[in-house]
Amino acid sequence: MEFDADTAVRSAAQDAAGLVAAMPRLVLEARKIAASVYHGLHGRRRAGTGENFWQYRRFMDGEPSNRVDWRRSARDDHLYVREREWEAAHTVWIWPDLSPSMVFASPLVWETKRDRALVVAFALAELLVKGGERVGIPGVMRPSASRAIVEKMAEAIVHAPHLQGRDIPSLPPKFSPSPLAEVIVLGDLWSPTPEVIASIAGLSASGAHGHVVQVCDPAEETFPFSGRVEFREPESGTTLTIGRAETVREDYVERVTRHRAAIRYEAERRTWTFIVHRTDRPASELLLALHARMSGDVPLAEVRAARPQETTEGLLNESVEREGAA
């Protein structure tokens, strides 16, 4: 089947109009979710110049001796520094994937992946700004601590020229965040595994911390299809027809598992976190999980001692070998 350019243009225009029309609803929903989880959340605990005690850590060579907490150090054979809570604002970059593949919702849910990513991005920005942070969108909006951060983000997205049409990028743009910054990636991450891994590597190269969230529809995870089914790739328009879809379910689930394993390994070995969120789950669930990880309430899972096939390269090579054999 040949790709119809006219159809693609019309479809892109409809998607753009749909996004603009949905913005007021998404902004309202984000504010409601942020308000529902705001009470009871404590401030983000980061080391810095605040007045409240945060934690003790080992003294490092080259630090001024006046930073040593001698009372705590007297109880051990090591020197310790008394770190205080981080209170100075820094930047959190939030990138929601708005590519065509995100405009999908199976009959199992009522909300598209795009809408869920935007709601969580807006709600998280609302919480962060209330906590004294600055929030920006890579390639779209400069960092801001505006009280109207949600409306500011929505307006920037709607008017960003490169977020219109069918060529919207599926991964964050290349940029170098500050080592003190944090990066939040919200997307379906169905790009080829090497591209996703390269994106994480580039974003973390400066030393910035980050959190990668795969937002997926439950149908994309369980593959509940049977009989003759035509699948259409939303970004290229190409189609694939399978006579008995149920016969490929096991292979499909296995490939998804391997794809995620490679992404998780790459994220965790760079001290980033990786979360899978399904759109049949509440948005507040993901918002709380992200806030907990950013606050340090959930320690990063220890990366298992890697056997050769568990390294990123091993996972990718094994995947390629299986595809070749197929």
Image (spheres, rainbow, N blue to C red):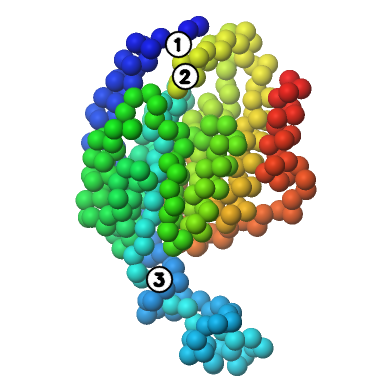
> Nearer the viewer's eye, disc 1 or disc 3?
1
Disc marking residue 86: 3
Q: Which residue is mark 1?
A: 3
Q: CA distance from mark 3 to mark 2?
A: 46 Å
Is label 1 in a helix, a strand or a loop? loop
Give whichever of 302, 306 is nearer the camera.
306
Cβ atoms at labels 1 and 2 below 8 Å apart: yes
Q: To which quarter of the image does residue 193 belong?
A: top right
Decide: is 244 above or below 94: above
Is label 3 in a helix, a strand or a loop? loop
Residue drawn 74% across and 27% down?
Answer: 322
Q: Could you tell me residue 231's position as x and y percent?
A: 52, 15
> Which comes sooner in the sequence, label 1 or label 3?
1
Graded by Cα atoms within 10 Å as few (under 14), some (14 to 19) or many (20 or more), the crowding at tag 2 reads some
Q: Could you tell me residue 26's position as x and y percent?
A: 29, 37
Q: Amino acid at mark 3?
A: Trp
Graded by Cα atoms within 10 Å as few (under 14), some (14 to 19) or many (20 or more), the crowding at tag 3 reads some
Q: Amino acid at mark 2?
A: Ser
Q: CA distance from mark 1 to mark 3?
A: 53 Å
Q: Which residue is mark 2?
A: 236
**Number of numbered discs overlaid on the protein picture:** 3
Q: CA distance from mark 1 to mark 2?
A: 7 Å
